[in-house]
């Protein structure tokens, strides 16, 4: 990083010099084309990557609609704010679990209403969950996948034992369900709005989050106002504007100009530069986002565990942290990041870099010079990551070619076990429960295990399925965490279907006049702005 | 001439049919599908088949094509797989933005291109002429995306004069009726919308307008010079008609024909080609929507956007041709091509 | 200046000699610059101080650092070497795409123009349809379908240039087809194929070549735009358009990483545009004589 951090902030200086050079100081006063800074006072401006204007929680629309806006305007039964590994009460003020771990009773917090004034009771909650569950529900959108994210066929049904109690019945114990209820697709929708708008609810959304939607201009911005009857009380900042600013250059210009208060979209390369500016603060957040290298266990030479181990040993993760993330990332342990339950410091051994041992393993397996293809997306940090991974794998005697593909092509090949060998995989923590990285990704029957790594064909997979099922049935958080520690070790030592590559976070930039931004959540896409406030 | 108009108009549906078919087929030929994009958000393989069935992607290509065409005949552009919104609504949200940008770019192109052409053609061969021709060529040679980034760097970051992104500042509330800001400002009695709208339009339209002004300048300049050498101008000169009058009444009027063609072609190109400016400046236009839709395999949106752009392109070209025929007395007499 | 009106005015008494010298030098300049680009690209392995895709120094060195005149990028790769090697895809794609477009479009237009009649009408309407298709979309579709590579980028750019050549060739060929020598050849019983290739093609080749030179710049710019959108070459291979994209996020820190590759694209496009312009001018005046 020499040469980048040790010179003066060039922006301030060049701006001044430039002005003097052209003698434009006077002209600038006469040309007040640019409006005064928009942000500050009572409006907090947040940058969105995109905005469709459809806030349908039960389908995936895009990060802008489905996560950033949804988190700000809606809330579910539970909440995870990333400061605590355990779910906290939200619209439910508490819950009880039956002895066998299959019946969850949620006590609905009394006195709450939706944005449209309708009361929140067990019937209202049931209405939302019924909409996920019942395929004949007329308000259910096409492509509703919410039930799948709640637990799929393991969810037997819902009941309302009394007016303020909501019950979920499960086929098998599932300790992660409390965490999953905090996902942005598990929010409670106003039943009156649902009756009125049906499938169009996303265009006329009403829930019970800290902010209510005041106006929406698709592709441009959504304006939100503080909601008085939010369960944690009225948020301090009265107005939030989420403005679409997809390009990094424009975002940084907006930050520097005070037109933007909070963003989690700035590139890692610019963290040091922005931090040096006095009006901007970079919030450090835990590394919840993992990049992994999936290895297709169904194709030669990757069907040989020695080759997979060699690849794992051959990735220079320190170089990735420095070159692809400009130091703003961590060398991982294995699947579970250090910030979550299920991690043990001993996991770091699964990410050792040992090119000599890697080469020896390849020689033993007769795979020196083997040609492998690596598929990667062509946007975000992936091309930077791909270049370092390709280089270090070629350094141990493989012959890796990386293909940088558009999203459609990449995903098409990722889900086709015949169409890829090595592939990058991202896992972020929508909710920091240890199960979130295992049952949806590495259990038999998931697209991850069946198609991406094809590990379902390995003899060790049956045991892994058992371990994951058992861990998720454990009700005691401490004991449960320990089980996930062991699952990490089992997968790494016995199977190695994926290599952990790097753990990182989305750098969160905040103007210094804003406090209380939940950076850990923003660092992994979740957007909880209700604790924010302006200084002075 | 009426025959030609009718023939061209009659051909419009054929063009649209061909464009629709071409986009339909090429999109299906791309690897990956919407389902894979959506499936990256969830886990079980069973859900994937369910999605394929819900989207109708399990039908044969031929069946899908027939469904698409029968919807199209009823002017139904379909619904976006990913956003769940009607494509016609999405087009209504983005097309006016692109038209605004194209018109603003056209104005920049006309002012810069014609201004340079007039100044250069007044004294062909002079140093000014040489310098302007060099500038015109340079403008043409600038990569759009790069020029846009430089403009942001200078005017937004260093000078802090102009906004770098978006269409309106976050402080302005705007409830679109027509989605053309200028028209809505008049309809809604909101003069306060106009200035912020214009300031946001300046950098993107400079990017597109200046880089295309070079072409216009070169053609207009040579058009003016060549017209001034024609017989009727010489005759007028010999008759003692004052120089300025010759310039305005005879030379410019005749050169305008060529200029008109360039404008028509460029306007058509701007509609489809402002994608890059829309990407660099975060401008919410139809070009960016179309490219995103291709990359996420949102078939209905990509098809709808391409079709709408094609309609515009054909209509603009037709209008240009008609204007040309109307303005040029020689062509008015000749039937057809 | 090379056009006729220019010549008339530079022929003034007095400094005519100097002016003529200056204008000759100016006229030669674009050819010199374009040749420099070609030589630099050909000789990149000799000129480049380092391997363009290996880490050879600390990352993010500033301009004029010791051993790295233009600094290094985020991976510690030498920028000067990357820029030199980056010229290669630009030249290959722009020249290749234009050649391809000229051959295919030219042949298409030739067939259409010589045959005339209904076939001609249909073939030209097909070109109209292709032109009403947003060209950037066509290029993106080609690249998304075939995958990113040098060859596919060339194909995508060629597709976007094809209609220009088809129309020009058709106009030229239909003009030639009406001439006596073609009529004579036809009357003499030569096959239409013979007439097209032996009689008409040689006569329309020159204007097509002139046109080709003048669209090389456009091809280079289109290719750069597609690379900028991430649809061009595979990194780590250096490519100027992609370097602008990679450098863009560093514009606060190291603006030269965006500015230099863009500048090279612009200078190349400028030089070949002037070359094309000169050819077109001389062709026009040559045709009149």
Image: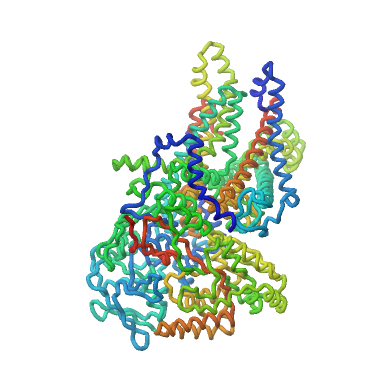
B24 or A272: nearer the eye? A272
**Residue at x 40%, y 50% (from the top left corner):** A258
A161 or C60: nearer the eye? C60
| Quarter-of-image position of residue B85 | bottom left
| Quarter-of-image position of residue B223 | top right
Spot the residue most to the bottom: A99
Q: Is residue B95 left or right of residue C189?
A: left
The number of numbered discs placed on residues in the rendered structure image is: 0
Q: Where residue A293 appears, x then y in whole percent?
A: 58, 70
Q: Is residue A217 left or right of residue A401?
A: left
Residue B135 makes an appearance in the image: yes
**Residue at x 23%, y 73% (from the top left corner):** A110
Residue C146 makes an appearance in the image: no
Residue A241 in the image: above or below residue C29 = below
Q: Where residue C247 appears, x then y in whole percent?
A: 57, 52
In which quadrant will I find the C terminus of chain A? bottom left
| Quarter-of-image position of residue A348 | bottom right
A281 or A395: nearer the eye? A281
Residue B212 in the image: above or below residue A533 = above
A127 or A496: nearer the eye? A496
**Residue at x 35%, y 71% (from the top left corner):** A79
Q: Where residue A216 appears, x then y in whole percent?
A: 34, 54
In which quadrant will I find the N terminus of chain A? bottom right
Residue B124 in the image: above or below residue A8 = above
Q: Where residue A469 appears, x then y in whole percent?
A: 46, 84
Q: How is the image coloured?
A: rainbow
């Amino acid at each position: 990083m020499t040469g980048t951090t040790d010179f003066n902030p060039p922006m301030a200086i060049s701006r001044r010099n430039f002005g003097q050079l052209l003698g434009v100081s006077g002209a600038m006063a006469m040309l007040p084309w640019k409006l005064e800074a928009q942000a500050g006072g009572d409006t907090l401006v947040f940058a969105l990557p995109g905005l469709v204007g459809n806030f349908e929680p039960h389908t995936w629309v895009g990060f802008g609609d489905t996560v950033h806006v949804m988190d700000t305007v809606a809330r579910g039964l539970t909440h995870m704010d990333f400061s605590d590994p355990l779910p906290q009460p939200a619209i439910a003020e508490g819950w009880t679990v039956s002895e066998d771990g299959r019946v969850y009773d949620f006590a609905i917090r009394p006195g709450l209403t939706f944005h449209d004034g309708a009361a929140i009771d067990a019937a209202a909650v049931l209405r939302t969950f019924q909409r996920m569950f019942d395929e004949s529900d007329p308000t259910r959108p096409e492509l509703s996948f919410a039930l799948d994210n709640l637990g799929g066929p393991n969810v037997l049904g819902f009941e309302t034992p009394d007016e303020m109690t909501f019950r979920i019945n499960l086929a098998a114990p599932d300790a992660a369900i409390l965490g999953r209820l905090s996902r942005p697709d598990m929010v409670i929708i106003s039943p009156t709005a649902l009756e009125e708008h049906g499938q169009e609810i996303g265009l006329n959304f009403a829930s019970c989050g800290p902010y209510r939607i005041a106006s929406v201009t698709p592709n441009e911005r959504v304006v939100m106002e503080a909601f008085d009857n939010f369960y944690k009380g009225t948020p301090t900042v009265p107005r939030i504007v989420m403005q679409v600013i997809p390009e990094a250059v424009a975002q940084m210009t907006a930050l520097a100009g005070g037109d933007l208060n909070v963003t989690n979209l700035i590139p890692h390369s610019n963290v040091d530069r922005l931090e040096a500016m006095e009006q901007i603060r970079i919030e450090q957040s835990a590394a919840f986002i993992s990049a992994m290298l999936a290895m297709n266990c169904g194709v030669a030479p990757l069907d040989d565990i020695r080759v997979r181990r060699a690849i794992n040993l051959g990735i220079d993760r320190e170089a990735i942290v420095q070159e692809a993330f400009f130091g703003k990332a961590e060398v991982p342990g294995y699947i579970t990041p250090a910030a979550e339950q299920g991690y043990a410091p001993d996991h770091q051994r699964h990410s050792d870099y040992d090119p000599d041992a890697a080469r020896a393993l390849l020689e033993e397996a007769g795979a020196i010079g083997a040609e492998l293809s690596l598929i990667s997306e062509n946007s975000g940090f992936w091309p930077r990551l791909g270049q370092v991974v390709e280089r270090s794998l070629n350094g141990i005697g493989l012959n890796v070619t990386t293909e940088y593909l558009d999203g459609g092509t990449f995903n098409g090949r990722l889900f086709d076990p015949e169409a890829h060998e090595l592939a990058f995989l991202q896992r972020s923590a929508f909710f920091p429960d240890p199960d979130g990285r295992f049952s949806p990704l590495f259990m038999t029957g998931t697209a991850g295990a069946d198609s991406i790594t094809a590990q379902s064909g390995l003899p060790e997979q049956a045991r892994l399925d058992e371990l994951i099922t058992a861990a998720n049935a454990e009700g005691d958080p401490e004991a449960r965490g320990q089980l996930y520690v062991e699952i990490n070790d089992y997968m790494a030592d016995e199977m190695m279907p994926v290599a952990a590559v790097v753990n990182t976070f989305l750098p969160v930039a905040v103007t210094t006049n804003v406090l209380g931004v939940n950076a850990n959540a923003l660092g992994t896409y979740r957007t909880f702005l209700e604790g924010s406030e302006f200084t002075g | 001439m009426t025959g030609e108009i009718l023939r061209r108009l009659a051909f419009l549906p054929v063009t649209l049919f061909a464009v629709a078919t071409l986009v339909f087929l090429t999109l299906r030929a791309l690897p990956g599908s919407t389902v894979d994009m959506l499936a990256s958000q969830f886990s079980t393989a069973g859900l994937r088949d369910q999605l394929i069935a819900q989207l109708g992607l399990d039908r044969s290509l031929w069946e899908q094509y027939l469904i698409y065409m029968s919807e199209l005949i009823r002017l139904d552009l379909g619904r976006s797989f990913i956003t769940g919104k009607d494509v016609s609504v999405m087009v209504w949200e983005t097309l006016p933005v692109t038209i605004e940008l194209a018109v603003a770019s056209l104005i920049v192109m006309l002012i810069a291109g014609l201004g340079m052409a007039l100044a250069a053609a007044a004294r062909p061969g002079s140093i000014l002429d040489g310098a302007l021709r060099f500038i015109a060529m340079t403008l043409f040679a600038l990569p759009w995306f790069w020029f846009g980034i430089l403009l942001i760097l200078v005017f937004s970051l260093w000078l802090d004069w102009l906004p770098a992104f978006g269409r309106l500042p976050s402080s302005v509330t705007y409830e679109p009726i027509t989605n053309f800001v200028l028209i809505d400002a008049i309809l809604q009695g909101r003069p306060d919308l106009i200035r912020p709208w214009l300031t946001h339009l300046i950098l993107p339209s400079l990017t597109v307008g200046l880089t295309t002004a070079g072409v216009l300048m070169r053609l207009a300049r040579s058009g003016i010079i060549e017209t001034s050498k024609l017989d009727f101008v010489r005759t007028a000169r010999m008759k003692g008609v004052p120089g300025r009058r010759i310039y305005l009444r005879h030379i410019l009027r005749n050169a305008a024909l060529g200029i008109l063609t360039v404008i028509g072609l460029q306007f058509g190109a701007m509609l489809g080609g402002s994608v890059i400016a829309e990407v660099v400046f975060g401008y919410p236009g139809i070009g960016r929507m179309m490219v995103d839709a291709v990359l996420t395999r949102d078939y209905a949106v990509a098809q709808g956007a391409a079709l709408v752009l094609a309609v515009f392109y054909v209509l603009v070209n037709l209008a240009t041709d008609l204007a040309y025929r109307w303005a040029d007395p020689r062509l008015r007499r000749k039937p057809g091509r | 200046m090379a056009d006729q009106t220019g010549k008339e005015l530079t022929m003034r008494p007095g400094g005519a000699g100097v002016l003529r010298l200056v204008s000759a030098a100016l006229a030669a300049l674009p050819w010199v610059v374009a040749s420099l680009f070609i030589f630099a690209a050909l000789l990149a392995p000799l000129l480049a101080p380092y391997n363009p895709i290996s880490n050879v120094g600390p990352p993010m060195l500033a301009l004029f650092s010791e051993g790295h005149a233009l600094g290094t990028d985020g991976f510690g790769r030498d920028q000067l070497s990357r820029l030199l090697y980056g010229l290669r895809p630009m030249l290959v794609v722009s020249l290749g795409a234009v050649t391809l477009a000229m051959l295919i479009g030219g042949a298409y237009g030739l067939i259409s123009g010589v045959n005339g009649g209904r076939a001609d009408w249909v073939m030209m309407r097909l070109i109209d349809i292709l032109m009403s298709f947003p060209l950037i979309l066509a290029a993106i579709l080609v690249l998304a379908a075939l995958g990113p590579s040098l060859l596919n980028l060339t194909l995508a750019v060629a597709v976007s240039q094809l209609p220009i050549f088809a129309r020009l060739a058709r106009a030229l060929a239909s003009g030639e087809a009406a001439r006596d020598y073609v009529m004579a050849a036809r009357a003499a019983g030569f096959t239409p194929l013979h007439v097209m290739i032996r009689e008409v093609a040689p006569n329309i080749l020159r204007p097509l070549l002139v046109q080709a030179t003048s669209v090389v710049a456009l091809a280079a710019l289109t290719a750069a735009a597609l690379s900028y959108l991430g649809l061009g070459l595979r990194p780590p291979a250096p490519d100027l358009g992609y370097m602008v994209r990679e450098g863009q996020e560093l514009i606060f820190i190291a603006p030269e990483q965006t500015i230099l590759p863009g500048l090279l694209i612009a200078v190349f496009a400028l030089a070949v545009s002037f070359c094309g312009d000169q050819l077109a001018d001389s062709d026009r005046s040559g045709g009149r004589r």
